[in-house]
Image (cartoon, rainbow, N blue to C red):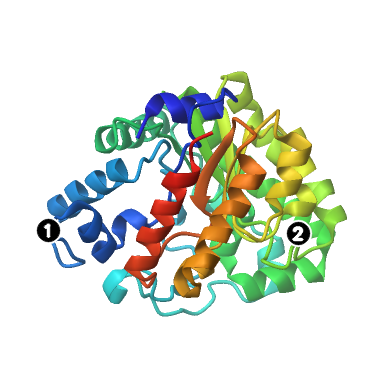
Amino acid sequence: MSYQEGWAALHLQSTWRVPRTEYSADEHWPLVEAVTGLKVSADSPPELQAQASAAFRKAWNYDLVWSIAISREQFGEHFTEMGHAVYAHGGQDYIPAGAARWTDPEQILNLEPEQLFGTPDHSALVSRFNSHYEEKCRQTPDAVNMTGIYITLISGLIYLFGWEELLVAAGTSGERFGGLTERYRRWIQPYFNALADAEAQVVMIHDDFVWSSGPFLHPDWYRRFLFPSYRALFEPLRQAGKIILFTADGDYTLFIDDLVSGGVHGLVMEPFTDMAKAAQSYGDRISFIGNADTRILFSGSRDDISNEVKRCMAIGKAHPGFIMAVGNHIPANTPVDNALFYHEVYQEMSRR
C-alpha cells in the first residue's frame, strides 16, 4: 500500500510495481477474515467491520480507493426503485423492485429537474465533499483517496425513471430526450462546481451510459447531447486542476476517444471495455484502471485466473498509468481460495 505509488500512476510516472485497487473485496467478510485473521462477519459491529476492512486494504496493497459522495439520496422520494439483487455477504443489500414514479413519456420528457429539486447551497456542498474526503483519508491514510459524484447524468436519469420508462421516453423523441439531458445537466452543474472547490485533488465521476453490449442509443445521440454535457460538467474541475477519473459499467469502447477529448484523465473499466484499445491509443496520456473479469474469479480454474491477470498485465504493465483491479468487483459469492490465488498472482506479476 502506497500513496506515493498511486499518486505516481495518476501522474503517469512509472513505479517499481503495478499499483492496485479493488472494489467490494474489503466487505467480502470470509475473505477479509482469511486475510487479516480478524473474526468479522456481516453481523459484526460496524467498528469491527471498519477495522477489518482497513486491515484488508493494507494487506492487499490498495494504492487507490474508489469512492463517491453524491448519489440518489439527492432525489429524496422522487426516484424509481429498480431493486437490487443479492450482492453483499448475507444478502443485506437485497431490495425489491418498486413501481415506476413516472410512466407517461410526456411527463418524463417535460420534467424540469431544477424545479423539482431546487438549487443546492454551494458552501454546504463543498463542506459535504470535504467531510467525505477527510473520512476516507482517515480510513485509508496510506492510499490515494477521492470524492465524487455517482448520478452524473445518465445514471441520474436511470434512478429517476427506471430503465423501461427511460428507454420509452428516449424512443419517443431523441431530440426532446436530449433536451431533458441538458436540463438535468444544468441542475447537476452546481454539484460539479462545488466539487471543483473541494479539497480532494482526485475526483471520481460515475455514469453508466452504456450497456454490456455497448450504446443503448445511436452513437450520434451521445455525441450531440451527452458529451457536450460532460464537457460542461468537467470544465470547472479542469480549471481547478483536478484529476478526473471516470467510471462506467458496460462496454464504452466506442466512446473512449470522446471521453479523453472531453477532459477525462483516467478510465475505470469493466472487462467489456477494450482496455487494449485504451492503452494503445492513450496509454501515454491517461491512467486506466481494471479490467480483470470477476466471472473468472468466481468460476474459473487457477490457470484461468492466472491467465486473466497475465492478460491485464500484458496490456497495462508497460504504461505507468495502469492500475490493476478486478473490473466489476469481487463480490461476496467469490470463492475465498480463488480470490486469495488471484492476489498471489497479482503479487508475482506486479513487479515491473
Residue shown at 29% from the left, 36% from the top: 140
Image quarter of the N terminus: top left
Q: Position of residue 15 (x, y in %)?
A: 51, 26
Look at the picture and state if 111 lies above or below 15: below
Query: Disc 1 vs disc 2: which is toward the camera?
Result: 1
Q: Position of residue 261 (x, y in %)?
A: 77, 34
The residue labelled by disc 1 is 45
Instruction: First in sequence, mark 1 or 2: give its number.
Output: 1
Rounded to the nearest angstrom, the CA distance separating label 1 from label 2 is 45 Å
Residue shown at 58% from the left, 52% from the top: 310
| Along the viewing direction, whichever of 98 and 223 lies nearer the viewer | 223
Q: Amino acid at mark 2?
A: Phe
- State which quadrant residue 165 falls in: bottom right
| Along the viewing direction, whichever of 309 and 321 lies nearer the viewer | 309
**Residue 177, disc:** 2
Q: Amino acid at mark 1?
A: Pro
Look at the picture and state if 345 lies above or below 158: above
Secondary structure beneath dot 2 equals helix
